[in-house]
Structure formats: structure tokens, C-alpha cells
Image: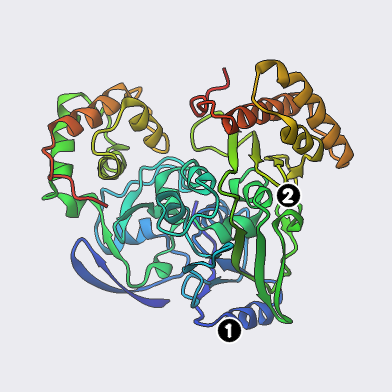
Amino acid sequence: MKPAPIAYVRPDTVERAVGLLSESGGEAKVLAGGQSLVPMLNLRIAAFERLVDVTGLPGLRSASDEGSEVRLGACVTHERIQTGDVPDPSNGLMPSTASRIAYQAVRNRGTIGGSLALADPAADWLATMAALGAAIEWVGPDGPGSCPAEAFVEAAYTTRLGLYDVLTGIRIPRLHPDARWGTYKLCRKTGEFAHAMAIAIRQPGGCRAFLGATEGAPIRLPAVEDMLAGLRGWDASDAARLGEAMAADVAAAGRSLSDVHAWQSRTCLARAVAMSFGAAPPRLGRAA
Amino acid sequence: MQPIELIVNGERLSAAVDPRTTLADFLREAADARSVHLGCEHGVCGACTIVVDGRIARSCIALAVALDGAEIWTLEGLGADPVIAQLRASFHECHGLQCGYCTPGMLVTAREILRRHPAPSEAVVREALAGNICRCTGYAGIVAAVLHAAENLAEGEIPPL
């Protein structure tokens, strides 16, 4: 299908973009790479009176290495993260994640800020940014705002961003040089949205473990993190204890997963942890 | 209607577009680029794959108005490209097509696969082609054609990305 009639503006300052969103009274939508929004317009799942294209705003395509952290502008594409065109604070976790988002043609245009702002629960950056302890920054009618990525998502497709806020960038703290990570997502077909996803980061001073693709906000797994801190290697016999810790964490977070979804999440988590200990990741898209 | 100016297959093109016009429809209608095929119109089939500013993109999920100033290549403009020439020969040799509807998108995508991976394994080709749907061939001929092209392109013939 084709999009319904819509107006388009391409402001050249963030303040102007926020002003355009405010004066549209909720009938305008921010357009970045468009790799999710334009399909939704084509299918007429979403309808707006006006698109505010933020890809021309100063600084939104830039990236800076600030030593202890890296700041990525909201319109940095997945492809630039995949290829190392922007600084990587994550010992390779972010390039690896970026290289598995959808397909190359989508990665070439889709942006990290657009993906976070849409907050499709099955998308990769929500859980990855939460696991890395990143902060999301925006500008709205009241000026700049920010929050930890872990607290950014309230529910599926619902974030802390107000109707007139523009997500401007992401600050990602640098992982410890000795940090080891693993990440795994389960897709029925390569490039499709994930059915389940897990990220495990082992590093001195605190391990991090998250489930993504949970149909809501990413779920942090504190009991799993405690277990990871004590592990000296990975053995398949650890999987049962890992699964119990995960189940306790999901329940403690007040969330529930269906039996199939819990099984898928457990599988992803065990593979992510094994990968953090050097196991080669199984072929993408194969559940065996 | 909003004015845009872009370069399509090496030629400057100025036009007034309705903001809701996708790049795919714009290229077919304003630039007569009929190799741009529309399959799904929501970014999953890959038949409309073209090159925007040196990288492949899906023209059905890009709005023409948002690409003001971009440089675009469709298969029509890549006739003299050595990688496309070899891919064409290899698709012919390896039976990489049947009805042909997905073929322009396959060729444009395969060109970028070879630019990113000049000597790809079969697994790399299969994964990188996962976003291009073919309902005729079962993919075996297409994958074989991309591998055949990689083997038959001389070093230096593939422009790096």
C-alpha cells in the first residue's frame, strides 16, 4: 500500500523541530531513517498529519569519543556502528549487534535513535543499551532531558519521551578492557525481529544480564548477574541453575513469560553466557 | 508538492513531489527506472533495492522528499559496472532466475555483498541475501551465481565500499 497524504518538514535546528512538534499538537511524528516508520505509513498502521525529518539537525549524525564514554548522535546508522565508522565503547558488542539487525539495506539507513524512540520490544538496541548502562538524551519544550536506558522504556512502543521531545543522542560508558560479553537472539528467519534475546556482560566491578524481546521493557536479571560474577567457566550443567535464576528474576520484576517464551529466553541466555566464555555462537536463526 | 533535486543514474533530476510518494514510485514514474520492482511495499522482500549515496537501500520504505540531494543508482544506470556485468553473466550461467521479478533487487544486493565480502563463503551469501525474497528458484541458483561471480571477478575489479 501507499502512505496517506502527509506533510513533510526538515527543520535545521533542534529547537525548530521541537517547535514544529508542539504546534502540531500530537499530530506530527519524528522521521529519522524511516525503516520502521515508513512501512507503518505504507501499511497505514500509523497516521500523522506531518513528518518532522530530524536527519538534517546539526550533530545528530556525529559521534564523539569522550574517553570514559562514547556519545552517538541519534541519527547514526546501524551500518556505521557495524563497520566501526563510529567509536566503539563496547569491546565489539555494539558492532556485533548492529551487524545482525534486519538486512544490510535496512542497516544502511536505520538509526540507533530511531530504533530506541520507536521502542519495538523485539528490536536490538533497547536491551543492548540497557545492558551497557547507556543514557538516552533528548530535547523537548522544557529543554534537554535524559534518563538511563534501563528506565527509558515503559511498555511496548512506549518510552519516557514526551510527544514533543526529540531524542538527540546516546551516551554509552566504556566497558572495562577485560569485559567479556555474549549476545544471542532467536529469529525464525535471519533478519526478522527476534522472538527472544539475551545479553550477558562479565566484567570486574559488576556483571550485567538482560532479556530483550520480552513484549515490554527489557528485563534486568540481578540473580543471573550474581551467578555470572561467581562463574569461572561455562559448562552445560550450569544451564539448570542459570534457568532458575532467570525465572526468579523475571518473577521478581513482576513480569511473566509464556512457557515457550521462557524456554526461548533461557536458551538465548545460556548461549549468551557461553559466548561470554568464548563459545562460538551457533549459526543465526538455527534453534538446534 | 515539494521541490527536490537528486542525481539518478548520473543525471540531475529536479521534480516536485507529493511528500507521501515513496522513492520507488518516484523512480519508476519520474525517472522511468522500471527495474525498481515493488513486491511487498513494506521493506521485507528486497525487490525494490537500489543504491543511495553508495549504499543499498529499499526504495519502497524511503520517501522521495526525504532524499533531496541524494545520489541514486538503479540497475538501469549500472550497465557498465563490472560487478553487475559479471553478476549478470553468473546469474545466466547458474540459472539464478526464473520469472525475473526479484532479479534487479538480487543483482543490486549481490553487488554490495561482493563489495563487503570479495571472497564470501556460501553461509555469508545466504545470510546476506536473506532480505531478498525469490518465490521461483529456491535460492540455490542465486547463491551459486553470487559465488560464481566472486570467483570470476579479478582482484581490483570490485570497487571497495
Residue under numbered circle 2: A156
Within 10 Å of disc 2 (Cα), the crowding (few <14, some 14-19, many 20+) is: some
Secondary structure of the residue carrying tag 2 is loop
Determine whether B76 is above or below A274 in the image. below
Which of the numbered marks, if any, corresponds to residue A16? Answer: 1
* Snapshot quadrant of residue A188: top right
- Residue located at (64% from left, 43% from top): A122
Residue A38 percent location from the top left of the image: 52, 57
Residue A139 percent location from the top left of the image: 66, 76
Determine whether A23 is above or below A97 in the image. below
Q: Chain of mark 2?
A: A
Q: Chain of mark 1?
A: A
Secondary structure of the residue carrying tag 1 is helix
In the rendered structure, the answer to whether residue A119 lies left or right of residue B56 reads: right
Q: Amino acid at mark 2?
A: Ala
- Residue located at (61% from left, 27% from top): A274
Q: Amino acid at mark 1?
A: Arg
